[in-house]
Amino acid sequence: MMTDEIPIKPVITFDELRMKVEKFVQTDEMSYTEAIIDICKDKDIDPEDIAKIIRGPLKDKLEAEAMELNIIKRTTAYLL
């Protein structure tokens, strides 16, 4: 007996996430954090799960926003 495997499609890909976040930030004037949380609610995704696919410039923008809001400590580099 042969079993057919059903391919599992991710709920959202990184590219879809990136485009939706940028759209919300630019058109709806949301913060990056608000945009990601809104997408998580819409897609019924745990924010901890979506954190696994955030990378590159989107991650950098999210970190910069969190530093600006004093959610995470600022990182500074000094040249000697």
Image: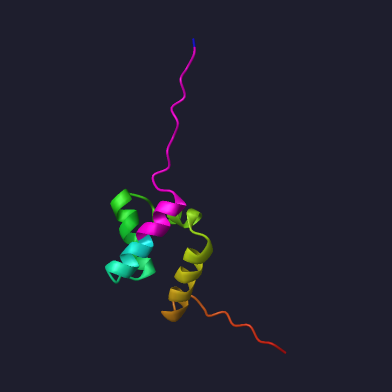
Q: Is residue 23 visible?
A: yes
Residue at screen point 45% across, 31% down? 7
Q: Position of residue 76 (x, y in %)?
A: 59, 83
Q: Where does residue 29 sit, x and y in percent of width and height?
A: 29, 72
Name the residue at the bottom extreme: 80
The spot of residue 11 in percent (x, y) is 39, 44
User: Does the magenta-highlighted stretch encompass residue 5?
Assistant: yes
Report the number of numbered marks.
0
The percent coordinates of residue 54 (x first, y second) are: 48, 58
Point 43% across, 27% down: residue: 6
Q: Does the image show residue 36?
A: no
The answer to whether residue 24 is above or below residue 42 is: below
Relative side of 36 to 54, left or right: left
Which of the 4 quarters of the picture holds residue 23? bottom left
Name the foreground residue: 44 vs 22.
22
Outermost residue to the top: 1
Image quarter where the C terminus lies is bottom right
**Which one is nearer the viewer's eye here, 71 or 17?**
17
Q: Residue furthest right?
A: 80
In magenta, the rendered stretch is 2-20
Q: What residue is shown at x 46% (from left), y 57% (from top)?
A: 51
Apparent side of residue 58 relative to residue 79 in the rendered image (left or right): left
Residue 53 on the magenta segment: no
